[in-house]
Amino acid sequence: MLNVGCPSDRVSGFTTPEFAGVKKIFEENIKNGLDVGAGVSVFYDNKMVVDLQGGIANMATGSTYDAETLQLVFSSSKVLTGIVIARLVEQGLLNYDEKISKYWPEFAQGGKENVTLLDLVVHRAGVGYIDSHQMTLSDLSNLESLAKILQSQPHNFNGVPTKAYHGVTRGWYLNEIVRRVDPRHRTIGRIVAEEIAPVYDIEFYYSITKKSLYQRVAKIYAYPMVLLPKWMISEPLEPIFDEMMKTDSVTYKTLVQSAPDRSQPQDWNRFEMLNYEGPSYSGVTNSKSMAKLAAIMANGGNPIGNSVTGVLEPTILSKDTYDLVMTKLPETFDVALQTRSGGSMLLWNPELKVGFGYCMNAFHTALSGDKRSLRMLREVVDTVKNLKKL
């Protein structure tokens, strides 16, 4: 267990009385060493009911994980990326059913000629790993040369649509498509910075180039598998972790080989790494911003209002586009994740009108949440169901 238990005064923020149970669990996670530093926020019925931060952002300096702390959220970055793509579809600049080659002619090589935008969005495009080139951090510094690397990669499965998690590469490919269709040739990160973050009063960065901003980013704490305490390991251990040790597996090629310089989790929020956009993994934000995005989606893409000014914000997606992106696809076996997968990664529930955001700087082995977040989420759901009975 991590020897970083903190007193309750290291927890800041608020909960409404009805959701006090979430704070209790959050404090237990920190006191018991399940979390080093973390944030959890919840919107219910378009109102923020939980916004908590606590623990340690950086053990070397002892800095507190507070409302100013930012967190690299890895694959949760894909959610806002997906919203950007949906907005471009709504504007008529993209179509999920079109072949990628319509927007990016050079993409049509190596068995990728028939791959559609939808294939890429739902992880069946066959470009989940790059094995024709060893990706380095310097490759990300020039988007023109990066595009040539990406388009030259042959289809991973000889042109056959196959569900395989595009953990790292999906954002690179989508970023190039977006640059080609946006009238101003902006990247996903630039669109978020101009059209989403300021409009919806959230913090969400796909790249960080200012040291002053980087100083707010929490340090990541992860462990080599052999050193993990038993309580950190999901039981039974998910099959993906065995596959990650096999250098010829799809999983290894996807999550290890394709990472720039084969970086490990604790390396991903180095300042140099965060200089460049990776819209599948490089999102830096906080739980409040995540929960607000989730709340907007739980509200059918409609605004929930600025909590400070009371001004009603614009609709993030029209009803037709929202219904389109919320269409549930059949679950299929994912050869990279080694499990059946489907559905959304961002935690919202339209029926309960709940948006849930949780971020942390200590990484365990569960892929679909672990006891830290799942206990809080259950508490939220149980509280909302009880409130609805009143």
Image: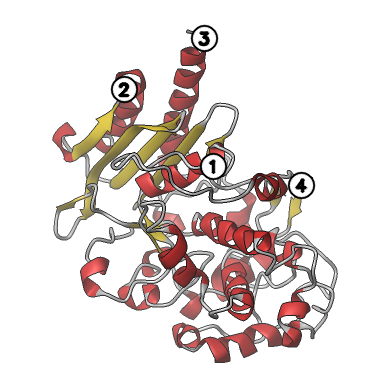
**Residue type beneath disc 4:** Leu
Earlier sequence position, callout 4 versus callout 1:
1
Please tell me which residue lies in front, 70 or 305. 305
- What residue did someone put label 2 on? 20
* Residue lying at the far front of the rendered structure: 311
Earlier sequence position, callout 1 versus callout 2:
2
**Contact (Cβ within 8 Å) of mark 2 with mark 4:** no
- What residue did someone put label 3 on? 389
Kindly state the secondary structure of the residue where label 3 is placed.
helix
* Dot 3 alpha-carbon crowd within 10 angstroms: few under 14, some 14 to 19, many 20 or more: few
Separation (CA) of disc 4 from disc 1: 23 Å
**Residue type beneath disc 1:** Asn
What x and y, as percent, mark residue 284? Answer: 38, 61
What x and y, as percent, mark residue 189? Answer: 46, 69
- What residue did someone put label 1 on? 302
- What residue did someone put label 4 on? 329
* Dot 2 alpha-carbon crowd within 10 angstroms: few under 14, some 14 to 19, many 20 or more: some
**Contact (Cβ within 8 Å) of mark 3 with mark 1:** no
